[in-house]
Amino acid sequence: MIRVGDMTTHDFVVDLDAMQRFQAMSGDLSRIHCDAGFAQERGFSGIIAYGGIMLAHLSHVLGMKLPGPAGTSTKWTINYREPLYLGEPARITLEITFASRSTGIVEGKFRIAAQEKTIATGTTQSLVPREQIEERRE
């Protein structure tokens, strides 16, 4: 059963292999993601991980953990706050903030962090089978 306040986490690291696979799939060869010298000239510590890879990890959280395999994502928002660097351990924390059994809508908020640094924040919305949502009791 899904209820407001449910939480889950997912740890990940974006490695060189993931970066190369994302480059090949997306065709995005932006130098900020490929050239450490270029990134450092722009004031960054090194190559910045693709935001799309972080979104793939968010997709894993939503599809496999919360709300899970029966859910269908309908809306995501994301605000990037700080860069995530190649090889930097990160964690996604997702919390359910709204759940309506009558509509089957479940909403959440998430944070992607590396240590104490907030990489990104955002919200999610999914449709789930109504019987999977715990009815609110006043």
Image: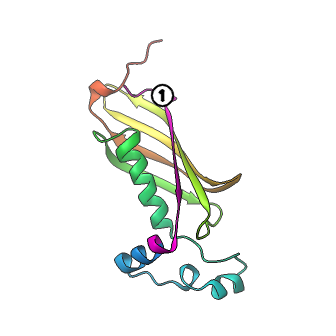
For residue 105, what is the image quadrant? top left
Give yes or no for residue 26 being in the magenta stretch: no
Q: Closer to the camera, 55 or 77?
A: 55
Give yes or no for residue 7 being in the magenta stretch: yes
Few, some or many C-alpha atoms within 10 Å of disc 1 (few <14, some 14-19, many ≥20)?
Answer: some
Left or right position of 102 against 119: left
Return the x and y of residue 92 as percentages of the image width and height: 54, 49
> Quick one: quadrant of the N terminus?
top left
Residue 10 higher or lower than 133, as above or below: below
Magenta stretch in the rendered image? 1-18
Q: Which residue is denoted by mark 1 in the rendering?
A: 4
Left or right position of 21 against 37: left
Q: Residue at x 50, y 66 (%)?
A: 51
Q: Closer to the camera, 97 or 40?
A: 40
Question: Which element carries disc 1, helix, strand or loop?
Answer: loop
Return the x and y of residue 53 as percentages of the image width and height: 46, 65
- What residue occupies the far top of the structure in this picture? 138
Left or right position of 36 against 27: right
Q: Residue at x 44, y 13 (%)?
A: 137
Q: Identity of the amino acid at label 1?
A: Val
Left or right position of 122 against 57: right
Here the colouring is rainbow
Q: Residue at x 41, y 39 (%)?
A: 66
Residue 97 higher or lower than 43, as above or below: above
